[in-house]
Amino acid sequence: MAGDELWYAGIRELGTRFRKRELSPVELTSALLARIERLDPTLNAFVTLTADRALAEAKAAEAALLRGDTRPLLGIPVGYKDIYATRGIRTTGGSALLADWVPDADSTCVTRLQDAGCVMLGKLITHEFAWGIQSPGHRFKPARNPWNVDHIPGGSSSGSGAALASGMCVGALGTDTGGSIRGPASFCGVVGIKPTYGRCSRAGVLTLSWTLDHTGPLARSVEDCAFLLQALAGHDAADPASSPAPVSDYAGALAQPIRGMKIGIARDFFLDGADDAVVSAFETALRTLRDLGADVRDVEIPNIWDAPSFMVIMASEAFAYHERDLRERPELYGDLLRERLMSGALYTGSEYVQAMRLRERLRGEMLDVLRTVDVIATPTSPKPAPTFTQMWDTRVGFPRSNMPPFNLSGLPALALPCGFSSAGLPISLQLAGRPFEEATVLRAGHAYEQATEWHRRRPPV
Amino acid sequence: MAGDELWYAGIRELGTRFRKRELSPVELTSALLARIERLDPTLNAFVTLTADRALAEAKAAEAALLRGDTRPLLGIPVGYKDIYATRGIRTTGGSALLADWVPDADSTCVTRLQDAGCVMLGKLITHEFAWGIQSPGHRFKPARNPWNVDHIPGGSSSGSGAALASGMCVGALGTDTGGSIRGPASFCGVVGIKPTYGRCSRAGVLTLSWTLDHTGPLARSVEDCAFLLQALAGHDAADPASSPAPVSDYAGALAQPIRGMKIGIARDFFLDGADDAVVSAFETALRTLRDLGADVRDVEIPNIWDAPSFMVIMASEAFAYHERDLRERPELYGDLLRERLMSGALYTGSEYVQAMRLRERLRGEMLDVLRTVDVIATPTSPKPAPTFTQMWDTRVGFPRSNMPPFNLSGLPALALPCGFSSAGLPISLQLAGRPFEEATVLRAGHAYEQATEWHRRRPPV
């Protein structure tokens, strides 16, 4: 195994080769570290590299394999978004405020992946404090999109998306408050799942917005996401929002066909303002799902247009979290982020309350729709990745996003590749399901992925 | 049965006499209507009397009794706080805005009591929009305290407290956002329970504050509250906050002794600023509970002093609910209520968010304490009922209340008589328990009540 075959291998294949002794975790880790050394000066996905530790963990994994250890994630090299606390390793949150913070404990998700046998390659750059924007001239340079380095990789889990797309790691952790897992997955042509609110622990992860923040994995296939989610999911007493709901067998669910699965489309909102290439890729994806036996039908979510209540909630909560630092050391924030955070000072308590009511109504409608269909499908983003210049031009503004409704509702939502624009930028399909039915969403995504080749394309790096 | 014996009889005794044919529901209803006619011009507990309907329902109950119907609430005359919608019967919310509103459907709680066989005597006056204040000169005159008509009966379920204390009804519905069931119970010397958040439906009840509003019963004994709660409790799909938790056998639980029950006291907060008479009555009540075999011990709730976050939450939510009317027809609000509601305009989204975080921490601490004790006991109010003059004097301000912490935490809390001030005004004991453990709280209250005579005293009306 060498070159692309090695850099882009999936978890199941790596495990098989480890156990056949065709490949060792040390070889794999060394190859990825070499690739990082070569590519990362351009892509800037890693903010901190933990090469020595990675090699030590790979050696330990090798020893465990020899002892017959069968854990699927054993020896799998991963990166952690730099808002997950890591014991003894700097955790910056992409912010100048935390540039020198060395936590004394791991976040729960990191503990779970490490306990599952993962090898930590390093910390992946995040947009400042996980808000999906990186100010120009900021202390930490932005990650770049492996498909075209003039384009953003999406955010805020920007390093996670860039590292996976460029074959620098096998799995990654991201967080998703309004699309920060699914956005980078979408723009970088990889796979990410925002699990149900409360499914994966937030203990030890920097807060952006208490009622909207989710943790979860990114990888290069739905199956790899399922393996990672299996290790991450489950109750954690250290996170007050953590759910005691039982954990499903995610990888096991993938084998089931999707014949008869009901898939709902709310075109009115989710296709609004979408590029032609996105609409066309999405319609083709629906045909593929139909060919697989899915029952694809239109659905109505009348109050989906209330989704902008998202910004009232996120900005109010983020401002509450940052208020003191914004007052005492505003200069340590990037200009664009500070401006956005300050917008949170302008909402009244009553506006926040109304936004939460609209949110509850929207969630109710989405749950109603999910009584008639198993999955809601949308394009993940109405447009492919913009350039950095477009992103920083405050006159352009953000396109309306298809991701926040699933943060407002807390429903599980998966993003996976479904095409490319004429400029060669990835296009992504979003599949969302009922609370705690990640297995259904992953199953639909896996069936689609098996029937298509999009996830096998490699960027020109 | 006549006079006090009739007016103050409890549900169990009335049922026995109904079934022995010593008393008919028609006789009882007629006697109460006559008493209302005599007392209510002074006490003003009823805003709308439904005498004809009551007599028709009493006749139907009489017929059902003859057919052997054994429902415990059959033929029991009750009043409904005037923020519970009643089909075809004016529902004012104590407000000039709704002075002529005639709902076309009953609220769920009203439906449940009517379905259980209750006889509706009429609608009980509430403080304007259920906020515990009634502006002087307001369109609807305030109810008066049967123990001393110069004193307030508590609020906002003021009519419920006054009607029960004066023997004008057997049971009543109240609502409790910051103590509006327990406060009138406390000041009027009757019994009221604010059940767990989500235990009783709010469908068809005017909103004060979405995250703090509770519905529940008032009566003159713990057992009567248990009978009423039995009919009220249970899931209602029409209330998004309604809980699917199973309903206990409340009346059945009362028979169990409380030997060994652990009762926690957080003196630091709950006795702060209390009148000597209240402290003395409370300590005597604790001795009684100890004599009954309870294990009374001190507990700590370190962040109980965060309870003022209550006002940020309530005012923000109430302002959100009333904003449009405050803008378009402010003259229809009483002066004091308008002033209070407008205070809700001054909180920022971030302040609301922080208040919700403090609330969550407080709830966590209270749940922690309830892992070490079964019940938390406090004086319900640090002082007996003030006079109307004191109430309307904005310089006096409100005494810190012992009730809102149980709205913030959503825990079930019972108020029952435990003494009298030297001026002859009732003093009340509050007993709170774990979520959905109303049965435990009622059991403790019933044991205390059986061992004391406070609930047998009658006001001088």
Image (spheres, coloured by chain):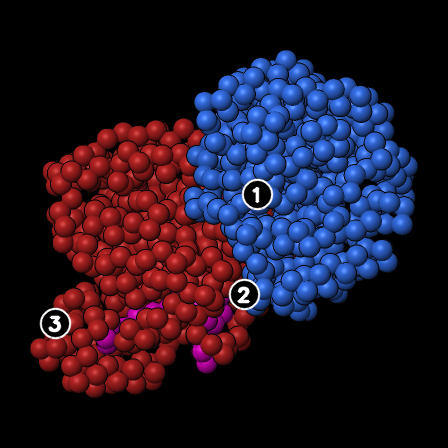
Chain colours: A red, B blue
Alpha-carbon neighbours of circle 3 within 10 Å: few (<14), some, or many (≥20)?
A: few
Query: B407 left or right of B232?
Result: right
Foreground residue, B168 or B61?
B61
Q: Which amino acid does label 2 sit on?
A: Arg
Foreground residue, B212 or A443?
B212
Q: Which mark is residue B371?
A: 2
Label 2: chain letter: B
* Span highlighted in magenta in the image: A74-94
Please indicate, yes or no, whether residue B186 appears anywhere in the rendered image: yes
* Disc with the residue nearer the chain's start (2 vs 1): 1
Which residue does the numbered mark 3 point to in the structure image? Answer: A16
Magenta stretch secondary structure, dominant: loop
Instruction: Please give the name of the residue rendered at 19% of the width and 54% of the height, measured from the top-left corner.
Output: A253
Percent of width and height locating residue A421: 25, 44
Which residue does the numbered mark 1 point to in the structure image? Answer: B226
Q: What residue type is labelled 3?
A: Thr
The image shows residue A420, relative to residue B104, as above or below, that is below
Alpha-carbon neighbours of circle 1 within 10 Å: few (<14), some, or many (≥20)?
A: many
